[in-house]
Amino acid sequence: MSDLQETTYLEAIRQAMAEEMRRDERVFILGEDVGVYGGAFKITEGFLDEFGPDRVIDTPISEAAIVGAAIGAAHMGLRPIAEMQFIDFIAPAFDMIVNFAAKSRYRTGIGAGIVIRGPCGGGARSGPFHSQNVESYFANVAGLKMVAPATARDAKGLLTAAIRDPDPVLYFEHKYLYRRIKEMLPAEEEIVVPLGKARCHREGDDLTVVTYGAMLYKVDEAAQAIEDEDGASLDVIDLRTLRPLDTDAIVESVRRTGRLLIVHEAAKFGGFAGEITAQVSEHAFEWLDAPIRRVTAIDTPVPYAPALEDYYLPQTDDIKTAARWLLSY
Amino acid sequence: MRDEPPCEDSTLNDLQPSDLRDIYRFMRLTRGVEERLETLFKQGHIVGGLYRSLGQEGTAVASAWALEDGDWLAPSIRDMGALFVRGLDVRDMLRQYTARGTSLCSGKDNTTHFTVPELGLLGPVSPLGTQLCVLNGVALAFKQRGEPRVCMTYQGDGASRTGSSHEGFSLAAALALPIVTFLEHNRWAFGTSSRREAAVDDWLDAASMYGVPAASVDGNDIREVYAAARTAVERARSGDGPTIIVAETYRMLGHAQHDAQKYVPAEELEAWRARDPIARLEAALRDEAGMSEEELAAIRDALDRELDAAVDDVLAEPDPPGEDARTRVYESAELDAAVPWTRGPVPGYEGVS
C-alpha cells in the first residue's frame, strides 16, 4: 500500500494519463499545445520530456484532424487520448465524433477506442466559449460513452477506465474543480472506476438527488443544510458516467424515496435531466409521490460578467428551494 | 482542361506489359461491376443510391497499382477500382449495394463504406473529406512504429472544399505523415461545377498551399497516374511525407442513378468521352504492347462469366435479420442488449399493458 498524498482533481487526471502511458506504450496524447507548452492548464507538463514527441503530439488548431487521427490510430491498435483545449472546441470535431467515431463499430465492425477529454463547465468567468457543458449535444448519439467525474478519485479512475475502454469515450473534466478539489489518494497506485456505475455520495431516505460534475458540491452543501435545518435526509447519486447511464441505481433510489430532483449545470431544454426524467417515469412512475423537478442553468448561452454567470448557474439556494418544495409536496 | 503533358518520369518504365494487362483487367472489371449494378438497380435489387465511377476508373486503378502489401487505402465512392486492386472480392462490392446480411458492413452501411484491416482498406463516410483525417491516424501509427508503410486516399474537387479536408492536409503536412492524396478533379460535385467550388482554373493551385509536393496528371492516362503515384508512394515510404496529386478527370454520369446530369453541357461530355481511360488503354495495348483484339476480348469475356456468377451468388444470399439492427453499437454485447430496452417490457411493469 503506497502512501496517501494530497491530490488535486487536475493532478489525478495527469496521473491517470502518465501512469497509463508508462504502463502501455500504445497510449499517446495529441492536441493543441499539449507538448512544448504542457497543456493550457499544465495537465501535460513534463509529458514531452518523459514520453517524447511521438507520444505527446502538438497539433495544428484542427479539432477534426485531431479526432480523425485518433480514430485512425485506434483502428491500428493504439490508444489515443485526444485533448480538446476547452470542451467548447469539440464543436468543430462534431462530425468526426458523431459520424466517424461513434458509428465505426456499428458500420464496419472496427471500433474506435479513443478518449476525447477536455475542460468543461462554468464558474471560471470565462464567457460563452470557454464554459459550456456539451453532454447533451452528444447524448443522443449511439456508440459514444460519456464520463463526468466530480471527485479526484473518480477523475483518475474513470480516465484510466476510459483509456482502456474499446469504445469512444468523451471525458468531461470540470475546470472549476481542477485545483479546488483535493483528496488523499494513494500515490502511484492504479485506480480504475468502471464506466457505467453511479456512486452513492450521501445516503438518505426522503429525496433522491441525481447529479454529476461540479454540481455535486452544491448539492452536497444543500443536502447538509436541509439535514441540519429540516431533519430530512437526501440520497445523493453522483452519476459519474452519463452514457451508459446507471438507470438501475437511480430507479432503486427513487423507488425508495418516492421523490426525485435532478441537478445539472447545463441548460434545461433538451438537457440530460430530460432523459433521466423519462427513464424514471418509465421505470418508477408508481413509486413517485411528487413531480420530478430539475434544477439547471437557465436557457441561455453562458454569460461572462460574474453577476450574470452567477445568475445563470444553478446555486445552492436554488437546490435547497427545489428540494424543500419536493419534500413538502 | 490541360493538354496532356509529356511524361518523362523514369518510373513509367516500371509498368511491364503484364502490368498493363492487369490494369486493363481491373478497369474492365470495375466498369463491368458497375454496369451490372446499373442493371440490378433497374431491376430493383439495389438498396438506396448507385454511384458510378464511369470515366474515372483509370485514376482509381493505376494509383492503387503503386501500393504494396501492408499499405492502406481509403477510397471515395468513385474509387471502386482501387479496392479491387487491393484485393477486394467482387462479391463484397455487390453485397454492399444489395444490402446483404453477408456484406462487409453486415447490411448496416452501403457503397464503399467498409473497413477491412486485412486488406488495408479504410471506408469513408458520407460527410466528405473526413477519411483523410482518419487515414492520417493510420499513417501516424505507421510512423510511430517505424514501419515503412504508406497510406493513399482520394477526394473529389467537391470533397476537397470541406473543412475536414483542409484540416487533414494541414495535419498530414505538419507531421510529415506517409500519405498520398489524389484530388480527383472530376468537374462536378453533385450538381455544382468545380468552377463554382473554387475560384481556381488550375486545381494544382488549390493543392499547392500545404507546403508539400503537389503534382497534376491526366487522370485518364494510367501511365501518368501510375508514375505520379509511384513517385509519391516512394517519397512517403522513405519518410519524406505527404504528396497531393491532382488527377484531371471527368465524372461521365450524374452524381447517382437518379441524376440525369441535365446541367452538363453536351459538348463537354463528348469531349471527355473521347478521352475515355479504358479506350485509351486498349489502344495502347494494341499499338504498343502488341495485344490482339482477340486477346482483349478474351479478357472481357472471362470477366463477364466471372461477374455473371458473382451476381447470381450474391442475389441468393440472405437479408440480415431485422434484430441485427441492435447489435455491435458497443463492443459489449451486454451493453448493446441494454440499449433499446424501452421498446420491450419495462422492469417493474412487466404485467402492465
Image (spheres, grey):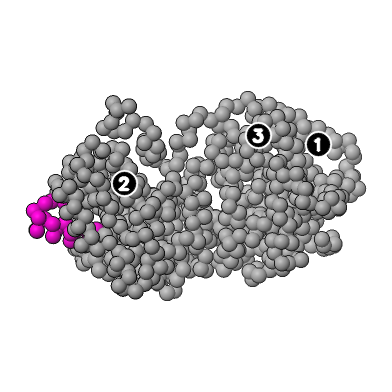
Residue in front for this viewpoint, A168 or A176: A176
- Mark pair 2, 3: CA separation: 41 Å
Mark closer to the observer (2, 3)? 2
Mark closer to the observer (3, 1)? 3
Q: Secondary structure at mark 3?
A: loop
Residue in front for this viewpoint, A172 or B245: A172
The amino acid at mark 1 is Ile
Label 1 crowding class (10 Å Cα cut-off): few <14, some 14-19, many 20+?
some
User: Can residue A219 be found in the magenta stretch?
Assistant: yes
Chain bearing tag 3 is: B
Residue corresponding to mark 3: B46
What's the residue at 89%, 38% (across, down)?
B293
Q: Is residue A254 left or right of residue B71?
A: left
| Mark 3 or 1, nearer chain start | 3
Query: Which mark, residue B299?
Result: 1
As drawn, B229 above or below B253: below
The amino acid at mark 2 is Ile
Residue corresponding to mark 2: A276
What residue range appears in magenta? A216-234
Q: Is residue A264 visible?
A: yes
Q: Quadrant of residue A40?
A: bottom left
User: Can residue B107 be found in the magenta stretch?
Assistant: no
Asked whether the residues under marks 1 and 2 belong to the same chain, the reply is: no
- Mark pair 1, 2: CA separation: 63 Å
Q: Is residue A157 visible?
A: no
Asked whether the residues under marks 3 and 1 belong to the same chain, the reply is: yes
Label 2 crowding class (10 Å Cα cut-off): few <14, some 14-19, many 20+?
many
As drawn, A14 above or below B116: below
Label 3 crowding class (10 Å Cα cut-off): few <14, some 14-19, many 20+?
some
Q: How many marks?
A: 3
Residue B181, position in %: x, y?
Answer: 66, 58
What's the residue at 13%, 51% (across, down)?
A233
